[in-house]
Image (cartoon, rainbow, N blue to C red):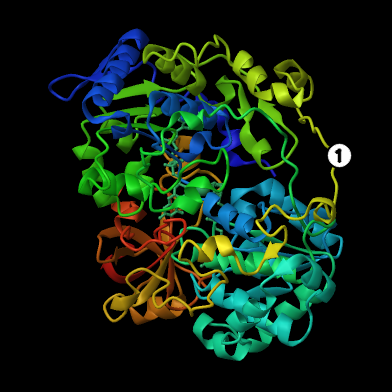
Amino acid sequence: MICPKLKAAKDIVYSPRRLSRPLLKDQNGIFMEVSWDKALDKIAERFLFFKNNYGAESVCWLRGMAADWGAPWDYVNRLMNAFGSPNTIGNGSVCHVGRELAHTVTYGAMTMPLISSSRCIIIWGKNDMDTNPGAAENILQARENGAFLIVVDPVKTFLAEKADIWLQIKPAHDGLLAMAMIHEIIAKNYYDASFVDKWTTGFELLRQAAEPFSAEKVAGRIGLDPEMIRKAAHLYAKTAPACIVDGNGLDMQLDTFDATRSVCILRALTGNLDIKGGDFIPQPVRVRNIQLKDRISEEIQPITRGYTLFNNFHETWGKHVQSCLIDSILDEKPYPIKMLVSQAGNPAVTMMDSNRVEQALEKLDYLVVIDMFMTRTARMADVVLPASGCFEKKQLNRAFIRNSPVRIQDSVIEPVMESRPDWMIIFELGRRIGLEAEFPWQTVEEAINYQLEPAGITFEMLREHPEGIRTDEIQFEKYKRNGFNTPSGKVEFHSGRLSSNGLSGTPYLNGYLTHPISFDDRKDQYPFVGISGARDNRFTHTQFHQVKTLARKNAGCIVDIHKSDADAYGIVAGDMIMIETPRGRIKMKGELNESVQPGVIRIAWGWGDIDPDCSLNRLTDDELRNPVIGTPSGRTFMCRIRKVSDSS
Ligand SMILES: Nc1nc2c(c(=O)[nH]1)N[C@H]1C(S)=C(S)[C@@H](COP(=O)(O)OP(=O)(O)OC[C@H]3O[C@@H](n4cnc5c(=O)[nH]c(N)nc54)[C@H](O)[C@@H]3O)O[C@H]1N2
Ligand SMILES: Nc1nc2c(c(=O)[nH]1)N[C@H]1C(S)=C(S)[C@@H](COP(=O)(O)OP(=O)(O)OC[C@H]3O[C@@H](n4cnc5c(=O)[nH]c(N)nc54)[C@H](O)[C@@H]3O)O[C@H]1N2
Ligand SMILES: [Mo]
């Protein structure tokens, strides 16, 4: 399965819209091309200015997904920590890292589903066919080899269609389903009693927590037949080995943390942890931590200070509650951020409640954007630096922080025009703000060799082994020797780390959320559940929509509506539909579709950069957030629809 983006790689890399030179805004707000020296000197001067006048913490670095698994994350943290600001913020509150915390609290690390050798696979909120075709191929292959497939998704995805059991759950209610499965597995004694006995804590509390959530009691609330829930619980618990693939469908939900934790508990309850065909506890490669976290004194709190557990659960994951940045700028709490560097992201479009985000970006004293294209965020900047894309640079693939093997992403061409790789921009900026000692490296190879030294791996070795290098043989049931990497050394159905932070130690022990969906309290005016999706295999978020060969005249910028709802509203395919929430409104073409449930609409994601009228985050809320990981509900919200014009 070749990704269309790869087929269009040449059009992306050599796009006439690529940024070619650094741009600096003049007094009239017009971008002027300048040399790299001039742009970097200006930025360095601003770093020092804000540090001297407001403290280093008034400067923040926000990182988007485009460099996500690349080592520039470590370099930026190093730069900011050595500079004295704890405010390096990623987007993990809405993507992946929040789930990683839920796994880690439960059994010490985020597991990896071993699909190929599994007999029963649950896909929980993941749509690999469009988002990770290689993984979809694995699942199809396992299916051909006889593995059962259960899909939990409110939408009939490609894999849902192929599943033995498709649980078309009401969006944002995954926690209830997982608890109902836990209830059933405990009640029917389907669980792995010897594993639970020896290797878990808090089983009695879990039993109590699950008590109110029998399949009968939960089914109506989540739009499923109780018998289907029982069947799924039986099939999963009684087929060994089994694994669960959890995805971004669980992220961006007010309930992400407890919902993911209850899914994690299912893995442990059924004895599927760290076995072949189950959910593997990774064996990360031990490399040097180059982030220099100890340079930040305890007295300087990060703007994400309300999320201590999330800030500190991993030695190099760092901080991720990006919404705190907006609070800090607009409400000046806990203190104001004055200067922002936005690298490899397009927050004006991709962060929730974009009206508020835009206000915040406007209010900043100084905004630097590092990107390949002139995005909506870049247009608001004081200075824009042209970044080289992934084919034009060498970087260490940071996936090794989760699992071996360690790999490099090698360059295949030189940087296009005057663009520069992110690492070079960071190193040069570091040296200009007085961090010559911390950034002595002239090439990225030197930096990579320094970081990999403890593992005995060098850049040259990695170049000879593009498939990557492992330092340890894969081993199963490692906990039998070392225990789990939790305070008790066991799987924690009840977590003291959570309860001592004032959170529920066992999921839903104190009941279920009153409002799992934003604007849920205004259902009478906003009767539809809006979900954000689908991701289209031609695009990544707001990227590539301007590439003609991919965009095909905005095809795909649509809202999926169930036929029965469309009939009730007099809507036919192709009509222009207004979608509205208390935060804002957008317009998109309607498409009648039976892959969504009645009462649910699915709104195409990622079109906001080329067309603000289609910018989904104009609808989303950023006020209600998950207490543990700070995610707002960007995935699901109540909304209303209205036909604005005919398809003709
Ligand atoms: N083509 C393409 N590929 C991408 C990206 C892209 O933008 N475009 N983005 C990349 C990034 S950063 C990420 S994080 C991944 C994300 O990739 P995935 O993890 O696959 O996530 P999504 O495609 O956002 O959503 C997965 C599924 O969750 C379902 N879902 C929606 N709401 C709920 C719910 O309440 N409960 C459950 N159980 N399911 C729900 C959706 O219907 C969808 O089928 O994709 C990566 N790959
Ligand atoms: N409502 C709603 N909101 C969402 C989502 C959703 O499904 N619904 N998805 C969420 C998720 S999972 C994520 S991960 C975020 C993504 O949020 P962002 O990270 O803001 O998403 P992108 O639009 O992919 O922006 C990446 C930018 O990096 C640039 N870029 C590409 N390669 C490079 C590079 O090598 N170096 C540099 N410096 N720049 C580069 C691209 O041109 C692009 O402008 O959005 C989140 N927001
Ligand atoms: Mo993501």
- Amino acid on which the number 1 mark rests in the picture: Glu
Ligand 1's quadrant is: bottom right
**Rendered residue at 70%/75% (across/down):** 165
Q: Looking at the rendering, which quadrant does residue 336 occupy?
A: top left
Image quarter (top left, top right, bottom left or bottom right) of the N terminus: top right
Left or right, 236 with respect to 43, comes to: right
At 76% from the left edge and 30% from the top edge, which residue is drawn? 468
Q: Residue furthest left?
A: 28
Q: Position of residue 514 (x, y in %)?
A: 40, 78
When asked about the image quadrant of residue 637, the answer is bottom left
Circle 1: element type: loop
Query: Could you classify mark 1 by the number of other residues whose Cα lies within 10 Å: few (under 14), some (14-19), or many (20 or more)?
Result: few
Q: In the rendered view, would you say 245 is above or below 366?
A: below
In this rendering, the answer to whether 625 lies above or below 201 is above
Q: Could one spot residue 538 in this view of the protein?
A: yes
Task: Say which residue appears at 67% left-offset and 18% top-offset.
Answer: 449
Relative to the observer, which residue lies in front, 164 or 645? 164
Q: Is residue 364 left or right of residue 303?
A: left
Task: Determine which residue is flagged by label 1.
Answer: 473
Relative to 62, residue 236 above or below: below
Could you say where residue 81 lies in the image, as x and y percent from the top left?
44, 29
